[in-house]
Amino acid sequence: MSPSGTIEPTEVVAKARAGDAEAWGQLYHDYAPAIFRFCRRALPSREDAEDATMEVFMKLRGKLVQYDESRSFSAWLYKIAANHCWDTLRRRKVRQDKETGDLDTVPLEHPDASQLEKLIEQRTSEEVRKALAKVGARARMALVMRYYSDMSYDEIADELGVRRAFVGVVLLRARHELRQALESRAALATGGAQ
Amino acid sequence: MSEANDTRTLQSSEHLDEITCLMYIERQLERVRAAEVSAHTQECTQCRTLLRALERESRLLTRALFEEDEPLPARLAEFQERARRSMQWIWGVVVGLAATGVYALYSTYVVPGQTELEKAGFGGTNLLGLLIFQGAFWKGWQSVVTLLEVLALLTMAGFAMMIFRRRSRRGYVLAMLVATLLGGVLLPGTAGATEFRKGEASERVASDEVIHGDLFITGSRVQMDGTVEGDVFVFAQSADINGHVKGDVIAFVQSTRISGTVDGNVRGFTDSLFISGSVARNVLAFAGTINLDSSSKIGGSVTAFTNSPALDGEIGKDVLMFAKDISLDGKVHGSIRAKAGDLHIGPKAEVDGHINFEGDKDPSVPSQAKLAYPVEFKRWVHDSENSPRHYVWQGIWSAALILFGLVLFLLLPDFALQSVDNSERYGASFGLGILVLFGVPIAALIACVTVVGLFVGISALFLWYAGLYAAQVVVGGLVGQWVLGRTRELWPLIGRMVVGLILLRLCTAVPVVGGWVKFAIVIWGLGAISLSIYRRFAPVVTPPSGASTPAPYAPPPLPPNTTVGGIQPA
């Protein structure tokens, strides 16, 4: 994420904490694209993502003093972004998924592996992104936290307010939703072509 | 759920359920369970295909999420520039405020002061110039060299601290800095033949003794009847300088009497200073009472911050004095500039230059006094607390304080937040506040008495004075949070600070009680600020080796699709 390479931006963060405007600009320059992409995937619209990115960096400014230098800065920043996006979605009273209610009743079915493999092979990244926009907020949030920012199960559980043991189920349900969205897009495309 | 799955024993005839497969590729299964799954997938083609499909799904997801399908919006790209510009705006405000302040000081104090001083024959110097170059601090170019050495040491120490700050414990660096400074201060002394004398009750330098260098002398009662070729530093309850000092006399003494001869300057931090001998150069004193006997002769100027001075001797140059009541019945060959409650001029007084006096009462001037010019008197004006002008000024001061707080919060947001947080540690804040409120000016004034510490002392006094206002801002921030609720955001905090400051100004405007409230607020806020400064420089305890090394930066990774035990592609 940082164009400067593979080193944590410890010096830049320290300077930004001390009020150095240049260092702050450097942090923004290095991390804004990644945070925008995170917000873009997690939130429904581009405008939402732009607003959220700015707000995340405004929050970062206030919270920088709390940053523990022994932790990864990028991971910490993603946590702030995830927290902000999930708060935004909750404030809008999005439809709450029912994971916590029926997590125990999720059937341990064995899907048709060949069919699943075929579905995945045929889909492009763009189609996945479009399908992602169709899935529920919680499912989308879980997928982005896990497969974009590599957050741990503990962190995801903390953000979504579910027990850690159910994070796997949340992710599996999210994948199911995504597959359904992909299949319906494919069906539409096939219908349109006929 | 995964834990539940972990407890089940896998039968070779059963297929793996999807959640188990997902937990397996996400490395969330326990080792035993993961080994079972790995073994099962070696035999079961269907489950292996499912695992592979889930892995591919993970990769597809990560790729889709990571692809840069759209550039950073222009609004966000400009945000950085706007943030930079906003900082420029802040700097603009700061520079503007500073320039206004400098102009106000210059036009209000320096220009009229300079004009008056020129009229009084001080040769066009300003107050600082008078203090440093015509006053008792000035020791010639040798002092400039020493001063440059000290400044160079300070700069070097500053650089060293910057370099080592990230690598060393801050306490150690601070200790190094202090040691370097002390070394720098003591080095010129050790080069000469400095003599140290310490007596429990009394210490005396006999009249036939000659000390070829500086003399540091301490004791309950000190008597110096001999000759010292360098400077004399006295720390005592009472000191009598009856001999001959070829350098300066620097006295930290309750009661100082100088009846001998001093070829240099006298600098005193003392309760009472009595001079009946001669001082070839200047006298600078912070003293309760100063008495220049009619037999005394001062070759240079007299600068004093005192309660009641009696100037009956002969002074070669100018007098600058801040006092309660001044009594003058001697000769002054220069001019006098004085701020005091009262000025009594005696019949034997002779003044060659101008007398500029600001005070409460008209000066008493007998007809026998020989004054080259009439006394220029300016009466102090005390605003009535009920006059509209008083309230207008209160409003202006409140607005200025809010502006000061705004700049402070924008320039140092983390520090401001930390200080507001610290102000909730009431005991520590009040304790430290009392210490800083009284300790810093005393330490700064002591530092000012020596040439080396002059700039350090003056800087410390300026910072301390600014701290008195910053303290109100910090407490304002806390009071605002009490009223409007807590926040960690900068602008909401600034809003709360403004509300809090207005409330505090209202409280401090109450007659009688208001003064005490303000006193408490200043102590409280100063303590909170000092606590924040202390925490910034406090030694940082190094965490255990495992945690101390920051994790190497890695971009968001590829999906966690490498499975435990290795998955065999079909």
Image (cartoon, rainbow, N blue to C red):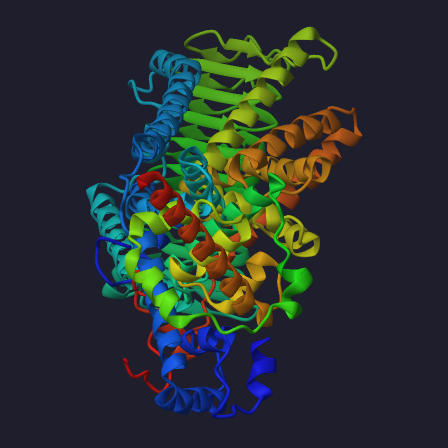
Q: Is residue B63 left or right of residue A174?
A: left
Q: Nearer the viewer, residue B489 or A187?
A: A187
Q: Position of residue B559 (x, y in %)?
A: 34, 66
Q: Is residue B290 left or right of residue B211?
A: right
Q: Nearer the viewer, residue B521 or B259?
A: B521
Q: Please tell me in which quadrant of the rendered image residue B153 appears.
A: bottom left
Residue drawn at the location 42% of the way across and 38% of the way down: A54
Q: Residue furthest front?
A: A194
Does residue A59 appear in the picture of this structure? yes
Does residue B318 appear in the picture of this structure? no
Q: Is residue A183 left or right of residue B393?
A: left
Residue drawn at the location 32% of the way across and 53% of the way down: B64
Q: Position of residue B245 (x, y in %)?
A: 35, 52
Q: Please tell me in which quadrant of the rendered image residue B139 appears.
A: top left
Q: Up-down: is B8 above or below A83?
A: below
Q: Position of residue A163 (x, y in %)?
A: 62, 67
Instruction: Point out the image quarter for the N terminus of chain A.
Output: bottom left
Q: Up-down: is B148 above or below B380?
A: below
Instruction: Point out the image quarter for the C terminus of chain A.
Output: top left
Q: Position of residue B76 (x, y in %)?
A: 34, 34
Number of numbered discs visible in the structure rendering: 0
